[in-house]
Image: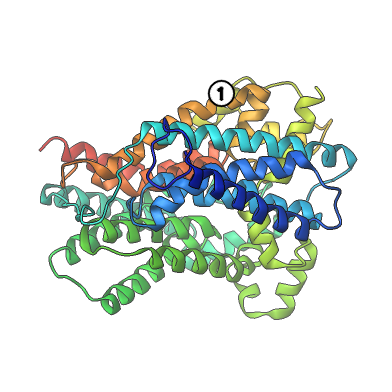
Amino acid sequence: MFGVGSRLNEFPSVRDVGFLLFLSLFFAIIYLVFSSEKEFEPLIFLSMLASVSICIVPLTEWLTSKRHILDPLPLFCMFSLHFVVFSPFLQYSMDFYPYLFWDDKNESFVKYWFLFAAVMTVIVVWVARKNAILPMSMRGNQSLFRLDKSVLSVLCILLIVAVVAKCLVVLKFGGIGGLLSAYEDRLSVGVSSYNPLSGIGPVVYIGDSIPVLVALAMTFYFKNREPSVSTLFLAFLIFGIISLLVVGLTGSRSNFIYTVFFAFSYVALIVKRLNLKWIFLGVLLIFVFMNVYMAYKFGGVEALFDEGKRQEIMINRQIENPLAFVAMRDFGRMDVQVTAMREVALEDYPLSLGRSYIGGLASVIPSALFPNRPDSFTKEKTEIVFPGMAHVDEIETNLVFGGYGEAFVNFGYAAILLAIPFGFLIGSFSRKFYVSSHAPRDLALYPAYSILPIAILIYDSNSLMYFSMQFVLMPIIITYFNSKK
């Protein structure tokens, strides 16, 4: 079960059992060191051990080149280890719960959250592995894919449309300076109270897809030229500047990261085989970028150059340690999900039974076309974070509960059943990278196959719809016309 490349229907070998015992001992030492001021909770320890044990297999296969570098299963496992093990455990050990009222009731539900997250992770990864091809070796079989030239004309048309859409957005505010001013006005008034892009959402989504289309165009340019590493580095640097100008001005760090991931993926799939060190370098740069750009996200342009302004922002937002904030708030959802679990389990908040997902689907429809569209998951989040207060526009939370949190608010402990189709989805995405054809018609969607499972883990349904509109819509259109050739 645990051995590298082994099938899930095999009995564990002596080596597998020994590995698990070693892993248990190692994890026990880590647990005791970091939770020395906490009472030992066997349920937390066993839950984390279960998550690590199920994720370690695809990760080991990935690290030993038995899986494709962009296979969504090991990428999901890598992120899950941080999301449901390391980040929440550090948060629990450090009592780090910014923006939330935390009391003994919350503390008592932490162990049950770890169990819930572990069960979800085990089921998702187990089902995904059963549903995915598990090659014994991918060495020599990671050939580059071919992108058909027939999509080039469609790509050029879409790029023109996207540029026009972005120009319309910028012109609406009188230029880039006006757009920056509108963003800073939103920061001063409050992101929950004022959205300068309200009413032009679809135009914004189309304009924000420029980097994805540029990444594909860059791939076409390089695919027959065998570029050197230094040339690719320069190309990525230029691409990063373009992405910052297109999607970074409104303070979205994640949108910038996704665009760079799409560019990296297209290059790794079509232009040049890249090894894992690029992935690890990317993860390191993500953490650096999340910390550096945090000043602009919360304080605008002035905060980038004014140390006093940055310190004021950090104090006002209760961010004593920016690195810890990124690791446990930006890349973690334990505290808000525990809060949701407490409210639902104690029957202080009724189950939504799918209502928030309907609101999420409707959220991308312009309010002018659907004036009475249902509220998104923001309604439930606000009523959970601010108990007893009705959801109104002036009072709402922008905290993100993530896929597991929203599922629990809708279905309670029965949300565990959603792990089964989620695992099938990841498994089906994983199989895409091991097909016999080297010119798949949906090649433009491959980066989405890699990153979408992680996005489901991170985002609420309405944010996931925004993600899909910005990063998946254009590749879907390209795939559609590619299939018509």
In percent of width and height, residue 17 lies at 55, 43
Q: Which residue is mark 1?
A: 417
Element on which disc 1 rests: helix
In this view, the residue in front, 479 or 166, is 479
Residue at the limit of the structure toward the front, as seen here: 14
- Tally of numbered tags: 1
Horizontally, residue 367 falls left or right of residue 185, namely left
In this view, the residue in front, 210 or 116, is 116
Horizontally, residue 482 falls left or right of residue 385, namely left
Answer above or below: position of 441 versus 98.
above
In percent of width and height, residue 11 lies at 46, 33
Answer above or below: position of 66 versus 104.
below
Horizontally, residue 132 falls left or right of residue 145, namely right
Q: Residue at x 56, y 38 (%)?
A: 121
Horizontally, residue 177 falls left or right of residue 481, namely right
The amino acid on which the numbered mark 1 sits, given as a three-letter code, is Leu
In percent of width and height, residue 112 lies at 74, 34
Q: Residue at x 61, y 25 (%)?
A: 415
Q: Quadrant of the C terminus?
A: top left
Q: 10 Å neighbourhood of mark 1: few (<14), some, or many (≥20)?
A: some
Answer above or below: position of 370 versus 202.
above
Q: Quadrant of residue 417?
A: top right
Q: Quadrant of residue 171?
A: bottom left
Answer above or below: position of 224 versus 436.
below
In percent of width and height, residue 387 lies at 82, 33
